[in-house]
Amino acid sequence: MGDVLAGFQAAWEFESDSVLIRFERGIRTPKLFQALGERRIPLEAIAAVTLTPGKRGTVVLRAVPRPGADPLMEAAAGQLKDACDPYRLVLPAERETLAEYYADELRAMLPSEDAGPAERYLVQPPETPLQFKAYDGKASFDGKSVAFRWFWTGASSAKWKAGDQAFAVSDLCGVEWRSPEVFEGYLRLLRRDTGVAQPAQADQDPAAVVFGLGYGPVHESLPFAAAVLAAVRSGGPAVLPEGAAAGPSPGAAVAPGPRRDPADIADRIRHLGDLHEAGLVTDDEFSVKKAELLSEL
């Protein structure tokens, strides 16, 4: 169609094979929309289109995503509030007739209503690299592996014993995201069968980071989860932004990273000592972990 329908906080551009959603930037725009910037939704990724009355003199045009078509919505698993749903376009009620026209035009362009779940992701995942701060550690994803670096102020003794973690995409089978806007939110990496069951509590699982007030906000942790999930399901690394250097190939030598702040290392060793004195870390575990930390200076 090539037309643009502008609403509050977003505008939809209708093309022959997709809908390009551009999100506005502003203090009233949800941070998730600002983080996404824009998203191209192929028509085959849309299951249906609805038009319903909204709040305070508005109408809501919504494209219902096809199950399994969008890694962001699959990672969200129905936990997003309506105001943060990227598939909703809110318009003034006086534009209802125009919105109904576009809804009808869009419905006519959709594939069969009985298409069923998508066999692969049809919407591009967020670009890597991505990172965010959780309550107990920092999570980063470069497109090939996920790394968790624990904070001495928040990580449990179980995570300190395990040490900082790195998980190759090939070792994962999924991602579980529990919104930071609910009690005990977390991001957990689901590992392929290792013969060892993952702890039920995320704060005890070295393959998970937990959220807290101000930590792991939706606009940072959800795109992160979606990018990891897309990489896992595709069986390969996530999409890197144009011009970004790909990670080393398997077996390639990896240059050492920058040295860490000595004050940070000292704090981590002090916390390790507290765990040792409390009997939560054995003598051998204390010696090994202390040596690892000192080697990073």
Image: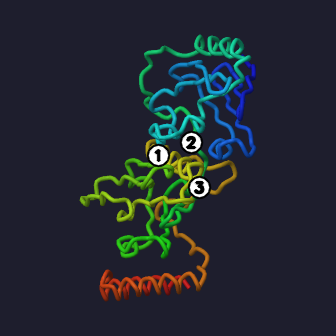
Where does label 2 land, which residue? 125
Q: Nearer the viewer, residue 261 or 27?
A: 27
Kindly report the distance in space between the C-alpha atoms of the residues bearing marks 3 and 1: 13 Å
Q: Which element is circle 2 on?
A: loop
Q: Which mark is residue 130?
A: 3
**In the displayed structure image, the side of residue 33 where residue 111 appears, left or right:** left
Quadrant (top left/top right/bottom left/bottom right) for the C terminus: bottom right
Residue pictured at 69% horizontal, 21% vertical: 15
Quarter where residue 24 is shown? top right
What amino acid type is highlighted by mark number 3?
A: Leu
- Looking at the picture, does residue 193 appear above or below residue 149? above
Residue drawn 73% across the image and 46% down it: 27
Residue at the farthest left position:
195
Q: Mark 2 and 1 residues: CB-CB less than 8 Å, in contact?
A: yes
Label 3, residues with CA under 10 Å away: few <14, some 14-19, many ≥20: some
Which residue corresponds to mark 1? 229
